Amino acid sequence: MATQAHSLSYSGCNFLRQRLVLSTLSGRPVKIRKIRARDDNPGLRDFEASFIRLLDKVTNGSRIEINQTGTTLYYQPGLLYGGSLEHDCSVLRGIGYYLESLLCLAPFMKHPLRIVLRGVTNDQVDPSVDVLKATALPLLKQFGIDGESFELKVVRRGMPPGGGGEVFFSCPVRKILKPIQLIDPGKIKRIRGMAYSVRVSPQMANRIVDSARSILNKFLPDIYIYTDHMKGINSGKSPGFGLSLVAETTNGTFLSAELASNPQGQGTAMLPEDLGRNCARLLLEEIYRWTWEVDVSHYRTAQWEPTGTAGMWVLYLHKWQIISLRVKAQSTSPQDRKHAVWIRLLFFFLYSS
């Protein structure tokens, strides 16, 4: 059995989820010290504690130790077990905060995962369930994770601060991922979106669609934005509205942008027309920056930033011995951005049943 003396050690609260997820995949324990040690409110936050409880639910035999102040966490992962589960997420963060990590862990469970997550489905901080469904699931399907049991569904929509949303996620077991290459992202061929509203007039969603199309129609004709207005118990506990946009390329790459209204009682009121136009501009900006995400064989980015989220993910994967890493600068055509970097990733997952 691994001991604390043989565990990896980190300081600070940054990349807490990534460290715990990689610890679970590799089976190596981790100790994290000085978690907000100098803050007026030191230690783990409620949403981080909720995430740790979620890891405890999806695993069997995990050992978790937290000191009295919450500034030191020791995590010795158990077996990824899966099964049918339910979890109440903290309303301080969106369900996407928890779902991002489950997408990494679910294929390697002992049993297929079927889980109901309750909380905030759409907010201004974390990826919404709509965006994850439109971008992450198609990417995972290219790795061979597919079938009728691979599903992500919004049962109830919940906005902050009250939440009240509910999401169902199920994923089959895949011990080995199919290698793919996404070197050439292709050209934008269509844009899809979801305009949603809860506990407000249904016209809010229609106004969002019209304003977003007024910007996007100048870029592309193939645009369709769905509207979703949930009522009653399915509308959560707080009013709000928002928009999620996803651009798909000819080679199956997805670029996304989203905006949600300010939570009730916080900040200034936002017009649906402004939200729609701003979200459309965010998507166009994302297309302009054009960064390609990691895949099992190759990863290309317009500008390599080791301190960014994607960069830290790659470096952590290398440190945890989940991948071997080779970084090589490539010459690019005048149409490409400067400082393009190609990274060849040879994945060998250490986790096994």
Image: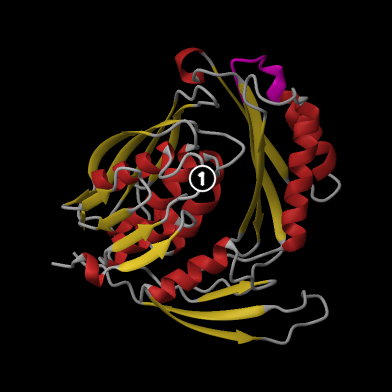
Q: Is residue 48 above or below residue 262?
A: below
Task: Give the residue number, with chain letter if any, for mark 1.
Answer: 39
**Magenta residues?**
197-205
Instruction: Identify the residue at horizontal 76%, vertical 34% (top origin).
Output: 276
Apparent side of residue 50 relative to residue 132 in the rendered image (left or right): left
Quarter location, residue 309:
bottom right
- Identify the image quadrant of the C terminus: bottom left
Apparent side of residue 93 relative to residue 225 in the rendered image (left or right): left
Q: Is residue 115 above or below residue 109?
A: above
Instruction: Identify the residue at horizontal 76%, vertical 43% (top origin).
Output: 280
Quarter location, residue 268:
top right
Instruction: Identify the residue at horizontal 43%, vertical 36% (top origin).
Output: 153
Q: Residue furthest toward the left?
A: 1
Query: Can you give x and y, in whole percent of width and height, for residue 140 in the image?
Result: 44, 58
User: Does the magenta-highlighted stretch encompass residue 260?
Assistant: no
Query: Can you give x and y, in whole percent of width and height, for residue 267 in the image?
Result: 71, 26
Q: How many marks?
A: 1
User: Does the magenta-highlighted stretch encompass residue 204?
Assistant: yes
Q: Is residue 284 above or below residue 41?
A: below
Q: Is residue 24 above or below residue 176?
A: above
- Identify the image quadrant of the N terminus: bottom left
The amino acid type, in three-letter code, at marker 1 is: Asp
Query: Can you give x and y, in whole percent of width and height, for residue 42 in the image?
Result: 45, 43
Query: Can you give x and y, in whole percent of width and height, for residue 59 in the image?
Result: 22, 51
Can the viewer see residue 112 in this picture? Answer: no
Q: Which of 270 and 229 lies nearest the eye of the viewer?
A: 270
User: Which type of secondary structure does the marked residue at label 1 adopt?
Assistant: loop
Mark 1 burial class by Cα count in 10 Å: few <14, some 14-19, many 20+: few
Can the viewer see residue 54 in this picture? Answer: yes
Q: Which of 164 and 184 lies nearest the eye of the viewer?
A: 164
Instruction: Identify the residue at horizontal 48%, vertical 73% (top origin).
Output: 315
Identify the coloring: secondary structure
